[in-house]
Image (cartoon, helix red, strand yellow):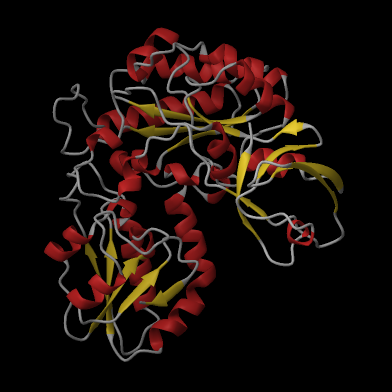
């Protein structure tokens, strides 16, 4: 195997050795290079030898000696990710309408992306060579979608073409020094209750290098056509989940089991204190987001007030249904400190995906267009997380679309109140 060199950075070690884009990197110190992580792993030493295949088919070897602050400068061709081969009964992507950003329909299940980006993998597409590489290259920690330790139930939920004894795999990885974070998507009446109790018991086995266990409710949109029937969580069932988790944390003297914020909202319970979440190991799963928002706001409040006072207008602060109580408290606190300005809060329903979706990251332009009601003297405060890194909403609208739709100034605030800027 080999990787195609797509680009060589100027003034890099590779450029100094006359390595060119379009050539192929075959190996480093005799080790095959198959992707970006191999490249990083095998070139981490101060001295190594590259085997290069030129564009005209000639083989040559290049010795590299690193100096302080030097960089190799080889950019490989884009990595081809490994896709999910399961047909999970709860898959969110299967519940999305057509016409959204193309990347939203990608079902990745790649252990390299798990390690690098924290994406969750199912273990159902890994072979012996993959496990050997994970262990040899110390690809740890991994993020694993487990859902249950009952193999029959897991197969029923994930409908994989390759059945995996997940608990045995976790023990094998642990024995070889690999740690992991666990995700459990709970479905009412399927893998909660007694099944969840057993799963938590199994995961607290002393053999396992389990760093955290995130328990999140199944996400259900209004587009579940021709899919199996699944009921959403309500106040009663969310309360039962929280009670079960509290009992497990006590029984196992465990601080690594974390319920999603949505369970607390549904159960109408207070969000736990900051100490509960340690270093927020499953923030991307919606676990601890509301608590972190509160804590960060307290730290950044003075700077935010200074920003708000710069402009001679009032503000309309947008909130998701899930964050309504927190955002309302923040607005009330700001209003106590603003003299000639006022912030009002508007909660945006998720009509696009349906009433069971309540988080701010899934707010769309179309729902804002239908519901947003700014006054002429108000600037709009939007959560920045409704845009991706390219500045587009889920339904493909960018900053220019917003500026053309609303003539009001728009202030984007990071969902944790860490940063803000006018659009």
Q: Is residue 295 left or right of residue 381?
A: right
The one nearer the camera, 337 or 327, is: 327
Instruction: State which quarter of the image contains the N terminus.
Output: top right
> Which quadrant would residue 266 be assigned to in this image?
top left
> Which quadrant would residue 366 be assigned to in this image?
bottom left
Q: Is residue 53 above or below residue 71?
A: above
Q: Is residue 226 above or below residue 291?
A: above
Instruction: State which quarter of the image contains the C terminus.
Output: bottom left
> Which quadrant would residue 364 be assigned to in this image?
bottom left
Residue that appears at 67% across and 55% down = 20
Residue that appears at 42% across and 45% down = 286
The one nearer the camera, 274 or 416, is: 416
In x, y percent, where is residue 28? 77, 38
Q: In this view, does 186 lie above or below 114?
A: above
The one nearer the camera, 363 or 231, is: 363
In x, y percent, where is residue 242? 40, 32
Residue 287 visible at all: no
In x, y percent, where is residue 74? 67, 53
């Amino acid at each position: 195997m080999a990787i195609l060199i797509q680009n060589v950075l100027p003034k890099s070690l590779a450029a100094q050795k006359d390595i060119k884009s379009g050539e192929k990197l075959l190996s480093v110190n005799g080790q095959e290079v198959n992707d970006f992580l191999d490249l990083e792993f095998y070139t981490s030493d101060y001295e190594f030898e590259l085997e290069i295949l030129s564009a005209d088919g000639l083989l040559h070897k290049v010795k590299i000696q690193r100096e302080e602050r030097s960089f190799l400068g080889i950019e490989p061709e884009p990595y081809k990710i490994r896709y999910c081969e399961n047909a999970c009964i709860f898959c969110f992507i299967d519940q999305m309408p057509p016409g959204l950003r193309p990347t939203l329909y990608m079902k990745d299940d790649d252990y390299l992306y798990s390690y690098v980006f924290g994406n969750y993998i199912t273990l159902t597409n890994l072979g012996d060579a993959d496990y050997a590489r994970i262990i040899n290259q110390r690809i740890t920690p991994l993020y694993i979608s487990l859902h249950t330790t009952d193999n029959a139930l897991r197969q029923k939920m994930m409908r994989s073409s390759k059945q995996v004894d997940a608990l045995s795999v976790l023990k094998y990885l642990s024995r070889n020094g690999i740690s992991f974070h666990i995700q459990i998507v709970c479905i009412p009446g399927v893998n909660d209750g007694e099944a969840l109790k057993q799963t938590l018991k199994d995961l607290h086995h002393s053999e396992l290098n389990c760093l955290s266990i995130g328990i999140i409710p199944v996400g259900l949109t209004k587009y579940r056509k021709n899919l199996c029937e699944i009921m959403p969580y309500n106040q009663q069932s969310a309360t039962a989940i929280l009670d079960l988790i509290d009992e497990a944390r006590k029984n196992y003297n465990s601080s690594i089991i974390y319920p999603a914020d949505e369970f607390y909202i549904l159960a109408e319970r207070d969000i736990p204190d900051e100490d509960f979440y340690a270093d927020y190991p499953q923030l991307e799963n919606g676990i601890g987001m509301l608590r972190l928002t509160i804590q960060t706001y307290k730290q950044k409040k003075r700077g935010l007030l200074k920003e708000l006072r710069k402009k001679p207008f009032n503000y309309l602060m947008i909130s998701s249904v899930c964050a309504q109580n927190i955002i309302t408290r923040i607005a009330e606190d700001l209003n106590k400190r603003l003299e000639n300005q006022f912030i009002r809060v508007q909660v945006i329903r998720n009509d696009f995906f349906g009433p069971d979706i309540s988080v701010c990251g899934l707010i769309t332009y179309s729902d804002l267009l239908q519901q947003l009601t700014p006054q002429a003297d108000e600037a709009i405060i939007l959560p920045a997380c409704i845009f991706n890194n390219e500045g587009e909403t889920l339904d493909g609208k960018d900053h220019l679309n917003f500026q053309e739709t609303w003539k009001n100034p728009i202030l984007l605030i990071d969902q944790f109140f860490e940063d803000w800027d006018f659009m």
